[in-house]
Image (cartoon, grey):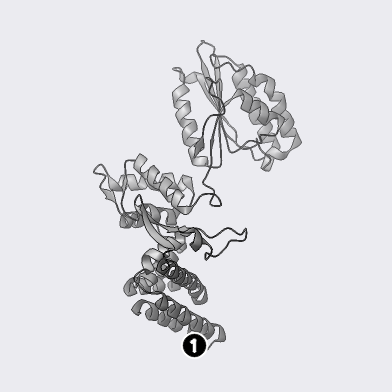
Amino acid sequence: MATPASNTKAAAIHFLSGSDEDAVKKAAADLARRFAPDDAMNFETIDGRADSVDDAIRSIQKVREAILTLPFFGGGKLVWWKGVNFFDESGVGRHASVKEALEEFLPDLDKVDGTSVTLLISASGVHKGRVFGKALLKLAQARYFDLPDLRKTSEDEIIFQIEGRMKAAHLRPGPGAAERFFQATGIDTALWSQEIEKLSLFAGEAKAELTRDDVNHVISGSREILVWDFCHAVLSGEAKAALAQLSILLAQDESEVGILILLAGQVRQAALAAVLRDNKMLRLANRGSFTSAEVSAAGEAYLPRKKDGEPISTYALGQVAQRSQHRPVAFWFHALSLIFHAQREMLTGLGDKRRVLELVVFGIVAG
């Protein structure tokens, strides 16, 4: 998400930065088009990516020369310092010689007036406590674009953001479409853009409602998606789909023990969801095209805790609750018993692991 500019004056220097690399690139390209001079000769791009100290110092020198060289035939000039990766303490940016070169560059930045020369800078980050960073942010109109932080942003909110991006691309996400997209792409916003573009081409001009199956068709399934689908098919009681997904996972040399452990986690959540639901501590609510779980304050006391003491995200619990709600609490505790005995058989070598796993799946989906 982009944060507001650090100041509101018409700036001679525009600075765009953040962990959302794709959003930074797009916003910078939009500004470059907006400020591009009529004469293409007055638009200069300087590569700011540096793999070494020498690369960084050369890049700084090129920008100095670009902003101090006025257009021969007059008019305004735009200089785009693109993809700078040495304004912070990572990589090349931590070297003293790079910091010194940036500080020596500051007097030249003061000469950028926005009339004869406009400077556009896109960067991966900036150290706001450094001399250079402080001075740059005082001179520039700054915008920041950062990826969602899963420690602070719920999965529901990220899916809502995905749905918003789909709608901005004139797509109409139907039930489950944005969820499936999130499951396949995570929070890689560069991948979001690529896959949304593919979905737009797939949808064509008609732009009919985008279904979960459409997203499945366009976005290649990963291991995580296969495991997710397998567990959800088991919880939903879909025997044919569960066994088909299980066959694919085993054909890809997934461990039977590993699959059983993942399934056990889902069944535990199904049992928890059933207990919370029966005690009026959990309800499912529709948000846009997807379903989320709302857990009461009393119910949160029963949620497993992360290492920092915070309760787990309710997103996964909501997905499990939605698929397992057709079965009572007693059924899910029985399913946990089946899994416990299967784990014991596998770990003691008492039976064929594949057969044991298939019997557990049959036992759960058949009910």
Give residue 328's position: percent from left, percent from top: 38, 74
Where's the C terminus, which quadrant?
Answer: bottom left
Displayed quadrant of residue 69? top right
Position of 260 with respect to 210 (left or right) is right
- The single residue placed furthest to the top in the displayed view is 73
Taking 177 as reference, is 356 above or below it? Answer: below
Mark 1 nearby-residue class (10 Å; few <14, some 14–19, many ≥20)? few
* Percent position of residue 282, x then y: 42, 62
Residue 101 vertical position relative to residue 360 in the rendered view, above or below: above
Visible in this render: residue 361? Answer: no
- Which residue appears at 48% of the width and 85% of the height? 352
Q: Quadrant of residue 46?
A: top right
Residue under pointer 1? 351
Residue type at mark 1: give it. Answer: Gly
Which residue appears at 52% of the width and 81% of the height?
A: 343
Residues 98 and 162: in front is: 162
Task: Using the rendered image of the protein, determine whether residue 27 is visible from the camera's viewpoint.
Answer: yes
Residue that extends furthest to the left in the rendered view of this protein: 206
Name the spot of residue 247 as percent of width and height, x first.
Answer: 40, 74
Q: Seen in the image, is 350 located left or right of residue 172? A: right
Which percent across, then down, holds residue 274? 42, 70
In this view, the residue in front, 79 or 7, is 7
Q: Is residue 161 above or below residue 214?
A: above
Element at badge 1? loop
Q: Residue furthest right?
A: 96
